[in-house]
């Protein structure tokens, strides 16, 4: 029998969790809905799921706390998608620092949630990252750069902030999650897409050349992202996880 | 020439004037009273001395042999009068009304023993002579030039010193009284409820401390009101987000129809309004975001690429090669709001960077522009341009207000102008260092 992904939805609003559950069920997923952290814990005692959708604003234990708890328990490999009720950058940043794989701001459309769920599942299944970025280590250091994975920008040696576009960040993140491993264009395209469902289909080659420019990498003699003829690209430097920046 | 007395404008000069005039008058009064008293007592002393002197001198001269009298004259002379052995100078007779007091005392001293006659000399005020005959019939004249003893030479010095002391004390008192007031005025003027409150020093004289405490309390109250307003907005928006989410989810279960699309659009508009409302409240309340050093070219590049990746026509021209200290999320928000605006009305946007003494980022479009009269007003919250397509395109009237608030919070400015050949130019100016 074909595997059906099992999604656990944790939200204190009964209508929302049931509407979301029904929508996902209608689209071929298996769903379980619970109202709070207590129910979530007791369900996860005996069951495993493929992905957890976690509301941030909940009475009792909030989503951030539950996410932190999940990341140190036996479900630490289960991807988490956060629902945040506030339109606030800091929530997003904290959510990602706590180890959530993605987030969605309320109010959201159910089809967008479905697209995100599928993207996160694809991303984590296809190539589990070699490195796990956690709350305590959100800086990835390579060469003379550091990538801040919560604020999503680069820092140079002097600490000057070098911004990245969404697509550039996602591509760089894929490289840094899989250093010294050859990635095909198809893999890169699959892993890079998914944040915005309607991402303009830019070719990976163009994105790589933009990223090289951003890293001040010489395209003829690249030090960071090397082209592997007829195979794809490889990130050739070691990557190190640093503690939170001062 | 018209001399008009103006009341001095500043409290300091008014207070100084009152203090100085009052103190000088009081000082002058007490000096005058003392001087008068001293004059009176000196005069009566002098007169009684003179009475004794004159009667003694006349008696001495009367008894002396005539040939010895001349030798005695210098010894009998005084500062104010002397004796001469002649009939005196011809002068006018004394006025009956204005008999000098000295003449009266001379009369009372010797009037009984020798008949007296007086003459005065109008050329010299108060100068008079008394004529009499001694017992042997020889003439004697008392030449009187009454004068007060001169003032001590140190007296004007003391008076000047007193004046200087008065001025110094006045200045000090006024300064002490005015300084806390000026400090309070400064604090009120620089009061910015959005920034961290600057507390006044609550030490000092009772009244000053009281005013400072009242000011600090007022500051805290304003901050509390603002915070309450923020919390209210945040609470409303949060509570609205849940029903909007439910409605959106329910709408997705509806069959495709025109009604569904309309409902979907309405929900989108509501959602947008809620978000912009919170963003505006936040932009006014000031941000907690920290300032970072950012590479401007990559910042703008990434912004433009994000638009291009979504299939939007946004172009960037110019390079600044600048590294600036700013709050990246706030700056991004300003640029996104302006670019979204351009895309909404013109379908395309062009970003242009220039650096001279300050940094200028222009967002240009070829849309309908804004009537000159309304260029200022459009930056006020909830203001909508007349005849604009704003309603139909779902604007909240907050985008530009947020952008302007944040531009100011970043230490810069935002100005709108119409371009030659049509379209709008929104220019964000930021300090370079």
Image (cartoon, rainbow, N blue to C red):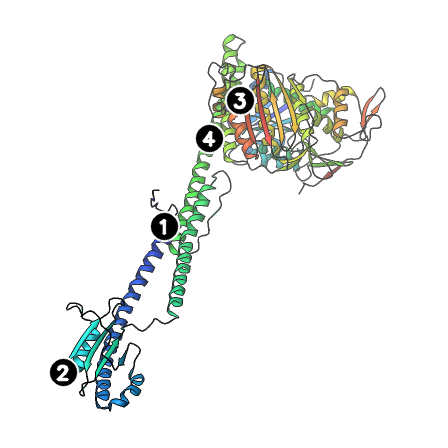
**Quick one: label 4 or label 1, which is nearer the N terminus?**
1
Which residue matches tag 1? B14
Q: How far apart are marks 3 and 2 (CA)?
A: 139 Å
Q: Distance between the residues labelled 4 and 1?
A: 49 Å
Label 2 sits on a secondary structure element that is loop
Q: Nearer the viewer, residue B158 or B392?
A: B158
Alpha-carbon neighbours of circle 3 within 10 Å: few (<14), some, or many (≥20)? some
Tell whether label 4 touches label 2 (CB within 8 Å).
no
Which residue matches tag 3? A18
Which residue matches tag 2? B112
**Quick one: label 2 or label 4, which is nearer the N terminus?**
2
Judge depth for marks 2 and 4 and give the one in front. 2
Which residue matches tag 4? B233
Judge depth for marks 3 and 1 and give the one in front. 1
Alpha-carbon neighbours of circle 4 within 10 Å: few (<14), some, or many (≥20)? some
Tell whether label 1 touches label 3 (CB within 8 Å).
no
Residue A157 horizontal side relative to residue B117, left or right? right
Please determine if labels 4 and 1 lie on a single subunit.
yes
Q: Where is residue B150 in the image (x, y as percent from the top left)?
A: 33, 72
Instruction: Please give the chain letter of the residue carrying mark 3.
Output: A
Alpha-carbon neighbours of circle 2 within 10 Å: few (<14), some, or many (≥20)? few
Label 3 sits on a secondary structure element that is helix
Does residue B167 lie above or below A8 as drawn? below
Judge depth for marks 4 and 3 and give the one in front. 4
Q: Where is residue B236 in the image (x, y as percent from the top left)?
A: 46, 28
Instruction: Please give the chain letter of the residue carrying mark 2.
Output: B
Give the residue drawn at x 60%, y 38%.
Answer: B290
């Amino acid at each position: 029998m074909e595997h059906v992904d099992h999604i656990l939805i944790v939200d204190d609003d009964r209508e929302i969790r049931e509407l979301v559950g029904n929508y996902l069920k209608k689209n071929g997923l298996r769903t379980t809905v619970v109202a709070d952290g207590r129910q979530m814990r007791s369900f996860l005692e005996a069951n495993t799921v493929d992905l957890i959708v976690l509301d941030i604003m909940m009475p009792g234990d909030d989503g951030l706390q539950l996410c932190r708890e999940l990341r140190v328990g036996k479900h630490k490999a289960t991807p988490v998608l956060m629902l945040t009720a506030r339109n606030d950058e800091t929530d997003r940043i904290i959510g990602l620092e706590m180890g959530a794989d993605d987030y969605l701001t309320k109010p959201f459309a159910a089809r967008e949630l479905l697209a995100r769920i599928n993207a996160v599942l694809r991303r984590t299944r296809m190539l589990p990252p070699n490195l796990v970025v956690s709350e305590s280590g959100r800086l990835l250091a390579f060469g003379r750069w550091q990538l801040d994975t919560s604020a999503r920008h680069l820092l140079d040696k002097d600490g000057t902030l070098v911004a990245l576009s969404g697509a550039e960040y996602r591509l760089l993140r894929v490289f840094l999650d899989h250093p010294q491993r050859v990635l095909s264009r198809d893999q890169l395209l699959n892993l890079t897409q998914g944040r915005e469902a309607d991402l303009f289909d830019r070719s990976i080659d163009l994105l790589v050349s933009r990223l090289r420019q951003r890293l001040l990498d010489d395209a003829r003699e690249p030090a960071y992202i090397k082209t592997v003829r007829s195979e794809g690209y490889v990130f050739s430097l070691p990557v190190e996880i640093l503690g939170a920046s001062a | 020439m018209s001399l008009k007395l103006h009341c001095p404008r500043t409290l300091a000069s008014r207070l100084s004037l009152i203090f100085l005039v009052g103190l000088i008058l009081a000082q002058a009064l007490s000096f005058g009273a003392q001087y008068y008293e001293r004059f009176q007592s000196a005069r009566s002393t002098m007169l009684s001395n003179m009475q004794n002197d004159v009667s003694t001198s006349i008696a001495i001269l009367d008894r002396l042999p005539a040939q010895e009298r001349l030798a005695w004259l210098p010894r009998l002379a005084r500062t104010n009068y002397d004796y001469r052995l002649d009939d005196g100078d011809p002068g006018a007779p004394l006025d009956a009304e204005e008999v000098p007091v000295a003449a009266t005392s001379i009369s009372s001293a010797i009037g009984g023993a020798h008949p007296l006659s007086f003459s005065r000399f109008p050329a010299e005020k108060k100068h008079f002579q008394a004529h009499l005959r001694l017992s042997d019939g020889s003439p004697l004249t008392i030449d009187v030039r009454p004068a007060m003893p001169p003032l001590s030479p140190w007296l004007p010095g003391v008076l000047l010193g007193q004046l200087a002391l008065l001025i110094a004390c006045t200045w000090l008192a006024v300064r002490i009284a005015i300084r806390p007031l000026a400090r309070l005025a400064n604090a009120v003027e620089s009061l910015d409820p959005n920034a961290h409150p600057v507390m006044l020093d609550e030490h000092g004289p009772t009244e000053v401390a009281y005013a400072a405490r009242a000011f600090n309390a007022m500051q805290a109250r304003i901050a509390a009101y603002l915070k309450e307003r923020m919390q209210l907005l945040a609470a409303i928006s949060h509570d609205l987000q849940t029903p909007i989410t439910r409605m959106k989810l329910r709408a997705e279960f509806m069959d495709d129809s025109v009604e569904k699309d309309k409902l979907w659009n309405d929900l989108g508009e509501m959602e947008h309004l809620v978000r912009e409302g919170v963003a505006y409240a936040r932009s006014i309340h000031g941000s907690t975001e920290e300032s970072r050093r950012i590479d401007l070219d990559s910042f703008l590049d990434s912004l433009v690429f994000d638009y291009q990746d979504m299939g939007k026509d946004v172009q960037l021209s110019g390079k600044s090669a600048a590294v600036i200290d700013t709050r990246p999320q706030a700056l991004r928000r300003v640029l996104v709001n302006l670019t979204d605006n351009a895309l909404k009305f013109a379908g395309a946007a062009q970003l242009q960077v220039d650096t001279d003494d300050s940094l200028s980022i222009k967002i240009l479009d070829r849309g309908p522009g804004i009537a000159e009269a309304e260029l200022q007003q459009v930056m006020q919250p909830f203001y909508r341009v007349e005849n604009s397509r704003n309603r139909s395109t779902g604007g909240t009237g907050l985008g530009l207000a947020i952008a302007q608030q944040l531009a100011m919070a970043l230490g810069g400015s935002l100005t709108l102008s119409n371009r030659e050949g049509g379209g709008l130019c929104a220019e964000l100016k930021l300090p370079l260092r």
